[in-house]
Image: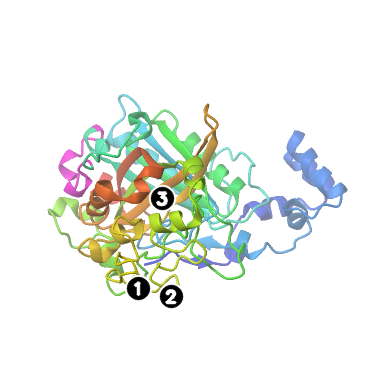
Amino acid sequence: MTSVTESNTDIAISRRRLLGTVGAAGAAGLALGGAGGALVQSALADGQSGAAGAAADGTRLSSVGATRVAFHADHQAGITTPLQAKGHVLAFDLAPGAGRTEAAALLRRWSDTARRLMAGETAPTADTGIALDSGPSSLTVTFGFGHSFFDRAGLADRRPTALDPLPEFSSDRLDPQRSNGDLWVQIGADDGLVAFHALRSLQKDAGDAARIRWQMNGFNRSPGATATPMTARNLMGQVDGTNNPKPAQPDFDKRIFVPAAGPGPAEHAWMGGGSYAVVRRIRMLLDEWDKRSLAQQEQVIGRTKATGAPLTGGTETSRMELDKLGSDGKPVIPANAHARISAPEQNGGAAMLRRPFSFHDGISADGAPDAGLLFICWQADPLRGFVPVQRKLDRGDALSEFIRHESSGLYAVPPGPRDGEYVGQRLLEG
């Protein structure tokens, strides 16, 4: 069910081995040629202990670099995979005149590239050499289909109703040029060069079949940066993801993944084992947020900033006592606190698996950071996951004053491919 990790020792031709087989620094320069070889030679000559030197002398990759996520699995990688340090999220539109045949050929190419790169190998065609001295670094590549894809590929009768456009929300300030798209790709890795290498390879694979509609870059805390594993923090400094469903919970699959046998018409069976991703670029008004005192920030969220514990006490995972009153007779967790409004018990049990990246795209003309959250959530049915929760947040969330929803997309993410399959094959060839 979850993404599988395994040692890098079974990789046939890894990027690291490709460089490592060259041997000495001079040979590395000859093999890579030009500036690339000069850079490797310089690192070794200067006695630097970078990855290039480690690869050349045969030492093992660190645990972060060696970790591999399986491409072939029941579910696509990048859904239940632990948060990764670096991410790219992008959407493509099929080129004019391209249809089902071109889409199938593109998904075959993309799947072959993703499988190889996730195993730590080089790209199947014209590898750029960006990540030659790296291991897999937990690389994941996830593919999905937008609502418009089915019309353009002549598959409208196979489009599930769960992919109907999301409703409008009053707080939305959406840029249509950075929303939706025929095809969606999520890339994650624990190394920035490995993630960019995948991005570049997939972009080249698209060729004349599809054009990039939008692309966004994100990041998270690096693995091992804390003394013990911890829930991630967002750019407001808040612990973010406390109430996420856990794979060990008995109803996890029911909440996150589409049942193999439906519901819905038989022609939608290709989504069995898949999931639906809602993607939102949420800008945080950090300058305004930082003007608030710690106590005010905690009232907005409903949790303490230091530990993520509910204001009613305990630890991060303690149950929120939503009926508890303070000495002033008011709820300890305010009625409009973000944590209260978004709690599953306040939304008929609605739940989604949040797996975001933070983003920072520079400084705006007014001097404010263009930064926030690339919100990505997963659910078996967005009408029972994201939509009811967002409707409640839209009506009275105290956090709304400090955020702006600037782009949005909903994508059907098919199940993981079986051995010998490409992603989406059951839709495109079924």
In this picture, residue 119 sits left or right of residue 92: right
Q: Secondary structure at mark 2?
A: loop
The residues tagged by marks 3 and 1 sit, at their Cα atoms, a distance apart of 33 Å
Q: Which mark is residue 142?
A: 3
162 inside magenta stretch? yes
Disc 1: which residue: 319
Q: Earlier in the sequence, mark 3 or mark 1?
A: 3
Q: Please state the horizontal and vertical placement of residue 39, each as a whole percent of the image.
A: 78, 41
Looking at the image, which residue sits at the far left? 265
Amino acid type at image mark 2: Gly
Q: Secondary structure at mark 3?
A: strand
Q: Residue at x 37, y 64 (%)?
A: 244
282 inside magenta stretch? no
The residues tagged by marks 3 and 2 sit, at their Cα atoms, a distance apart of 37 Å
Q: Please state the horizontal and vertical placement of residue 362, each as a whole percent of the image.
A: 55, 35
Q: Secondary structure at mark 1?
A: loop
Viewer-nearest residue: 140 or 382: 382
